[in-house]
Image (cartoon, rainbow, N blue to C red):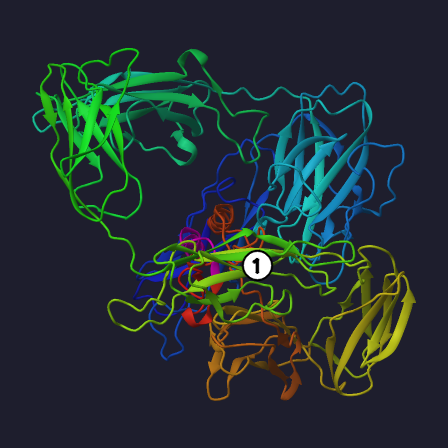
Amino acid sequence: VFRVVRSGPVEEPLTVYYRLRGSATPGEDYKAPGDEIEIPAGREAAELVIPTLADNLSEGPETVVVELLVPPCPEIFPPPPGCYVTGVPSEAEGVIVDREPPPAGVVLVPAGSEWAWWNRAEPPAGDWLHPTPDDPEWPVGPAQLGYGDGDEATVTREGPPPHPLTAYFRKWFAAPADLAPRALQVRLVRDDGAAVYLNGVELLRDNLPEGELTFETPASHGAGENENAWHTFVVPAEALREGDNLLAVEVHQHSRFSSDLSFDLELTALTGEPPAKPVVSLVAVVPETTEPSPETRVIPGRFRISRTGPVDRPLGVVCRFAGSAEPERDYRLDPPPGPLSIFTIPAGQESLDIYVGAVDDRLVEGDESVVAELDRLPLGAPEPVPGNPYLIDPDHARAVVVIHDNDQPSAAELVIHHPPEGAVLPFGEVIPVHVTAIDPKGYIARVEVYADGDLVGVSQIEFVRAPDPGTPIEHTVEWKDAAPGEHTLVARAVNSAGQPVESEPVHVLVEGPPRQVVLAVEAPNHETAEPGPLVDPAPAAFVIRRVAGPVDVAVRIFFKLDGSARNGVDYREIPRELELPAGHEALEVPVVALADNELEEPETVVFRLQPPICPMIYPPPPWCYLVGEPAVARIVIHDTPPANRPPRVGILHPRDGVVVMVGDTVEIVAGAEDPDGEVTRVAVLLDGRELAAAEGPRVRAEWTPDAVGEHVLGAVATDDAGATGEARPVRVLVREAEEFSFVRRELPPGYLPGQQLRVRLLARPPGHGLAWAVEDQPPAGWEVSDVTDGGRYDPATGRVKFGPFFGHGPRTLAYVVRAPADATGPQEFSGEASVNGRSYPVSGDRVIEPGDTRHPADQRPPELALTMEEVTAYATAWKTGQEWPAGPNPIPLSYVTRAGYLWKHGEAYAYDPAAGPPPLCWVPASEE
């Protein structure tokens, strides 16, 4: 139980916003109550209750942290009701104590053990997975292993992103001869996903896709707040052998731009007896019901799911439904099924009744069945024992409820269901006509369909066994070459008594042929590659086709090129004016990739047909075409490596824009790698002159600046074939030594026009400080909001002001900025801090670069299109409160709904800052 307390007026209720984090997992270890709590009017506090959940796992204590959030409020005085600031402390931690007894067993690999590891830019050579006589020579260090969090016992990689997607770990251990385990328990810290192998046999994979795993396979989603949480699994012990065993693990990142990686593992051989599983069964307590009517009371059908064993906890059971009756149309279930068709038997109950309420559909259908069948629980999360958490009674795993029909026809009838009355049908397409035939004294096997009195087609069904009297029989006739204009459809047949039967007429309209040319675009050959010394790839091509309209008209084509590839740079320039000549059905536009001798990810070329600007006259002029489907096509250009790829080099330390003082010792670290050879030399440059060099892929140097101003660091790497690569320059601002800085600024890695970003100011005032304050200035024109710690944005000076403060303890100040919709290029922050009457510069991050213009959900692969898998992964991360590698975090709900909107409207999308701030700036490609 957490207590949220307020100061100030208490006359009105106050809604307080918060978020949950910690090592405990919501939905597994506790029930997340939401993201807000109301302090009632007249009260100073409210209690936030976090209900814990039993998981049958022995995990040790786990934490839940409640962090108070500041609501978005306008910059007005006095602030409106509902606005508040957070005080100290603004977060609190609770501990969930595990009540499960520790499992009986032997710890084979303790947490914090030493592991051999590989975390380089290329995958390890040889067989890392299986035991071999020649063990690879990898570095060795204790867990936790990884980088980026600051809590690692062994740091496996330094420098900023991008990082390799996959890191590998190996450990030998000995198993005693008399162990005889019933199962193995694996406790795992993995950020983001991992697969665990024992002697080459896969024990488990967590947060990774199915299929083959490679060095380039990303994790299914980011670990978010659970990056340091322990995940517990119980797996079979067949792969364990007496004596020496090899445990191998591969840890995958969700993105190359993830800033951290974490790994630790504990392996225990379980020797105790497994907990008994409940046995679930299913029966139809009320096996039949009837469609309701105004004059009749109906008892609903009823299934009952029962369980054996203890009832102190709820039990989720999968029960699937089939049969001739359709849910919602013919019946409704009470309670309705949960996700994955799970029904939950509440704690304290041995059974759950599921009622089947029949729906009166006014159709003559005869009796229909609802078939219920128990199924295994599809466990995608750690489970308490191997296999399913319950057993199914095979003799009572299936039950049936029959729904009797209350509609009985007095005579044979034909009903045309499609097309519906008044339908407008397209010209030139085959139109299916669906007819239901019912004869209460027999059946109707042959149906004829007429349009305006002319026979359209016949449906005749040959039955091996005659249907029961009154059985509805579905007939379909294809109406081809329907002429433009209004038509009347009628179905005719003969009943079992030889009497004619005719349906009610259905009136439809068939549209005329289009008067205008209709164009569409496709890319039949949608892949190509850059040419190289050993490769001469075939070009790809866009094909613009006439899909309707006259052919004897020349059409000038209006279009827009988009994608990550650049016209005239990454591929041969496509002219801005294209014309489809008269008499031609199609125009081919080749896409010829150009070699740029750069190492790149696959690039895309997106061709979007645009409608011409036509005069408002009728009929429209011949050249005024319409845009049909598909209106967008995409081509992928793959990178072709040159005969010798140049080395890649980067400055790992310091970070771009760092602020140092005259006389400081600045450590400079540059590293390089060569994808097809070896790096022979790396040199560090200061203001264009060589400062230091070293043989091999890495160089360290120290520099003591003696001149105030901005200096530029660079690095050049040379490979064994003589090719060179240059690092992105790093700017260092040198200030006078007396300019003591006690406030450091932290900025996100990049920005998008219209996007909100959080700026953090880490203040460490000196011990002699009696009073101190901070002024920070964002780029001109950037909106400021959500200023913490009682700070305020001063529009007169364009600065965010905090203080004065009178303590000398550390404090993190923050505010939120929104980049303008037209923001471009690098943007610069500046600021000062004052203590005891003297001012000093704010150090740390100073410059922020433009970020990625893709929607954050676009990850697998990033190509300006959203798939169903990407949308559900993003929505799952939002639902579970996990951090997303592309930001922003926490994930806004509006970003999730926008991702779903883009997926439903063609998947391909474009970035258009004129459409509004994120997420409105991402628009369907068809609407751009």
Is residue 196 magenta-colored?
A: no
Secondary structure that dominates the magenta span: helix
What kind of element bears circle 1? loop
Is residue 905 magenta-colored?
A: yes
Frontmost residue, 770 versus 766? 766
Q: Amino acid at mark 1?
A: Ala
Tell me if 199 is positioned left or right of 60 in this view.
Answer: right
Percent position of residue 695, x then y: 92, 64
Frontmost residue, 70 versus 508? 508
Percent position of residue 706, x then y: 83, 86
Which residue does the image show at 60% across and 55% down from the upper left? 540
Residue pointed to by mark 1: 886
Percent position of residue 273, x then y: 62, 19
Tell me if 740 is positioned left or right of 884 in this view.
Answer: right
Query: Against 529, is 85 above or below?
Result: below
The part of the chain drawn in magenta is 896-909
